[in-house]
Amino acid sequence: MAGVPDRNYLLSVFQKVDKDRSGAIDALELQTALSNGNWTPFNPDTVRLMIGMFDKANKNVITFEDFIHLWKYVTDWQQVFRSFDRDNSNNINKEELKTCLTTFGYRFSEPFFDVLMQKFDRTRKGVIYFDDFIQCCIVLQMLTQAFAAQDVERRGVITVGYEQFLGMIFSTKL
């Protein structure tokens, strides 16, 4: 599904999930529009993160125009996910995650990949499903941006006090 689907199709999806006919959808409504590929609901934390990314008015809802952009975002991530799901299992194991994140330019140690698996493997089966994969990538991107803002010399090392560290984390829309 390259590009954005037909606007009329997206409008029909949007109207179907906009249960209260408010012209905007919240996280619960959006969750019903998204598919994980394994018959489980989309992770509410992932939905909340994406609402935060596309909610231009900061009201914890998205309009139809925001929804169009969010849909394309999810579709793009779906293509990325499928390209790294080498065994077509509808999940990403640790080796596939390592390949993916290394391709994205991240250089993490083996123990840190274990941390990522522990954090984003909600089912505790040694795999990450699509929604948690999106969440992992969003969180890494947001935290990397917060870090990079402090790493002005681009050395990969920063010195921050505890309060500054907390400010960096809490000001990040996680």
Image (cartoon, rainbow, N blue to C red):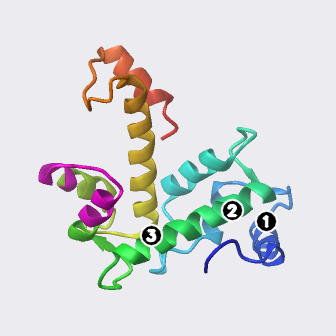
Q: Residue furthest bottom?
A: 88
For the point 39% across and 31% down, the residue is: 148
Q: Position of residue 60 (x, y in %)?
A: 68, 44
Label 3 or label 2, whichever lies nearer to me, is 3
Distance, label 1 to label 2, CA atoms, is 7 Å
Residue 158, picture quadrant: top left
Q: Give left or right: position of 35 versus 102.
A: right
Residue 157, picture quadrant: top left
Question: In the rendered structure, which disc, 1 or 2, sits on the residue that comes first in sequence?
Answer: 1
Distance, label 3 to label 2, CA atoms, is 25 Å
Q: Position of residue 82 (x, y in %)?
A: 42, 77
Mark 3 Cα within 10 Å, few/some/many (few <14, many 20+)? Answer: few
Say which residue label 3 marks: 80
Say which residue label 1 marks: 19
For the point 30% across and 62% down, the residue is: 121
Q: Main secondary structure of the magenta part?
A: helix
For the point 36% across and 56% down, the residue is: 104
Say which residue label 2 marks: 29
**Dot 1 amino acid type:** Lys
Q: Tell me the element at label 1.
A: loop
> For the magenta stretch, what is the residue range?
97-113
Q: Give left or right: position of 22 versus 94.
A: right
Residue 129 within the magenta-colored segment of the rendering: no
Q: Give left or right: position of 124 versus 12.
A: left
Q: Tell me the element at label 3.
A: helix
